[in-house]
Amino acid sequence: MPDSNYTKIYTGNSISAQRIAFELEKLDIIPVLRDQTDSGLLPMFGASNSILKLVYVHKDEYDKAIKIVEDLRSELQE
């Protein structure tokens, strides 16, 4: 999303990304979640556990959203 109005606020495992998305939605912020994959490099089995998720929010909501990530950081330690 380099040319968009969205900014990445988090990169991490799927569970942590979903937790952030849940907290953002409670504040009426609609996040965009994307997988960071290069399908040619993923092993056949267990790949879904190793895929990183990227969480983006609209630039207008960045300040509000990043506070959620910072507040959850200690819970999200991987």
Image (tube, rainbow, N blue to C red):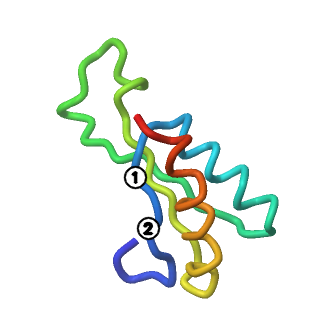
Residue 3, position in %: x, y? 38, 83
Amino acid type, mark 2: Lys
Marks counted in the figure total 2
> Hey, what amino acid is under mark 1?
Thr
Q: Are marks 1 and 2 in contact (CB under 8 Å)?
A: yes
Question: Relative to residue 14, is residue 59 depicted above or below?
Answer: below
Q: Using the image, tell me which numbered label, if any, was put on residue 50.
A: none
The answer to whether 13 is drawn above or below residue 63 in the figure is above
Q: Position of residue 59 (x, y in %)?
A: 54, 84
Identity of the residue drawn at 45% across and 58% down: 10
**Residue with the most extreme bottom position:** 60
Q: Which residue is mark 2?
A: 8
| Residue that sits furthest to the left in the current view | 41
The residue lying at 80 percent from left, 69 percent from top is 28
Q: Element under label 1?
A: strand
Mark number for residue 11?
1
Which quadrant: the N terminus?
Answer: bottom left
**Cα gap from disc 1 to disc 2, whole angstroms:** 8 Å
Q: Residue 48, relative to residue 69: is it above or below?
A: above
Identify the image quadrant of residue 30: bottom right
Nearest to the observer: residue 64 or residue 74: 74
Report the side of 7 relative to 62 (left or right): left
| Label 2: element kind | strand
Estimate the x, y position of residue 73 in percent, counting from the top left.
50, 51
Instruction: Give coordinates of residue 39: x percent, y percent.
Output: 27, 36
Q: Mark 2: few, some, or many residues within 10 Å (few <14, many ≥20)?
A: some
What residue sits 70% from the left and 61% below the top? 24
Determine the residue positioned at 40% across, 52% down: 11
Location of residue 64 by image quarter: bottom right
In the image shown, does 32 or 18 lie closer to the viewer? 18
- Quarter of the picture containing the C terminus is top left
- Within 10 Å of the Cα at label 1, are there few (<14), some (14-19), or many (20+) other Cα atoms? some
